Amino acid sequence: MEIEYRTYNSGDEKGLAELFNISFHGSGIGLLRTPNEILWRYVNRPGGSFKEIRIASDKHSGKIIGSVFCVIEEIYFNGKNYKTGSINDVAVLPKYRKYGIASELMKQAIKFMNSQNCKLSSLVADPKGHARKKIYIPLGWQDFEKFQIFIKPNLSLLKYLPLIFPFTPMLLFNEMQNYFQFQRIKKKLTQLNYDIKIIHSNENPSISLKYSSKLRKIFNTAAKQQFNGFNHFTKEFWHHFREKPIREGMFPTYILIFKKNKLIGFGSFLRQWIYFEKFGFRIPLAIVREMIIDHSNISKIQNLRYIYNFLILSMVKATKERNCAVTLFSIASKNNYSNIILKNLHFNRINGGVFMINLLDIKDTEKFPFTLKKPINPDIGEIFLYP
């Protein structure tokens, strides 16, 4: 077997999508990726480069058998932006595994990141997975922070999964609890001049565009106060990923929070299908992308807790309006505040991935702090459910 290692060529998106869908559906559960989504997510994104995509192909057949996407971006840590190589979609076709292909692709990605003067590299891995133990750790990545995944099923789940009918009383009870919590909190916050607006941008793109620049500014400002690791949104990135999605499910729904008509925070989610191929069905998920509030506008801790509860329950309400069967959050383990609130709102918790970093420029980052008081803000649109 002869393997050719190269970068992306025009037209590779079809083979890359096929590789992703085969590689990440080994458990029979996963999200699907299309060739157009490969182009939108990586190749055509602002600042995207063909060199960021490393490919292994069978030299005789030309078939793409492995890949790694190494996105060059900046992540904010402790008052400083670090040029980072973010590793995504490390994949090798099942029959080509155990030949060292993934390790070689990762080594090439490291060389590429060094050529781009990246200070560190980041990725999200399955904490119990083969790749973390056999590839990432030996090549220098270290565990940095774990994520928790919180899920809440809606009653519409019965439409897609009638087998859970025996659990209907529990779902109804949960819905009633959330309804009365929502009404109680809404009454309290209405008295304090807080309000919520839900915007489904797939239905009202002009309204979402009206708030676009304000939402980006709030995220960048508040995230710097609350998190020690997050991606800063440039105007070009926000426009590409929030205003110009390639299909309806990628259009975000926004839940806006106002205090006396002043926008002080928001949450958002996308509607994506998760496929259970072994069982022959699929379920529409609401995958939460942002949940951010400008704390400087809130004087009392009690009010802040009410507002987060109000935002989350309003988000669940919005997911029902968009016919999502399950709402899904990914929260960093150090984000105790959000973890406690989601638990108290009767979300079900499962273990998620682990955020790992690799210090590529030791001289520059030797004082890089590994004990952080603030949590990482994960790109919670890039969710993987680990089997």
Image (cartoon, helix red, strand yellow):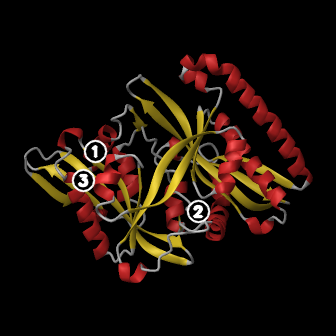
Name the residue furthest right: 191
Q: Nearer the viewer, residue 198 or 1?
A: 1
Q: Amino acid at mark 1?
A: Lys
User: Residue 165 location, x and y as percent?
Assistant: 61, 17
**Which callout, 3 or 1, points at the residue further toward the start of the chain?**
1
Q: Left of 301 or right of it: where is 204? A: left
Q: Residue at x 23, y 49 (%)?
A: 66
Name the residue furthest bottom: 363
Vertical relation: 283 (above or below) 347: above
Q: Residue at x 51, y 50 (%)?
A: 381
Kindly identify which residue carries mark 1. 14
Q: Residue at x 33, y 65 (%)?
A: 140
Marker count (numbered): 3
Kindly identify which residue carries mark 2. 375
The residues tagged by marks 1 and 2 sit, at their Cα atoms, a distance apart of 37 Å
User: Residue 158 location, x and y as percent?
Assistant: 60, 22
3 vs 1, front mark: 3
The residues tagged by marks 3 and 2 sit, at their Cα atoms, a distance apart of 30 Å
Residue 221: name its quadrant.
bottom right
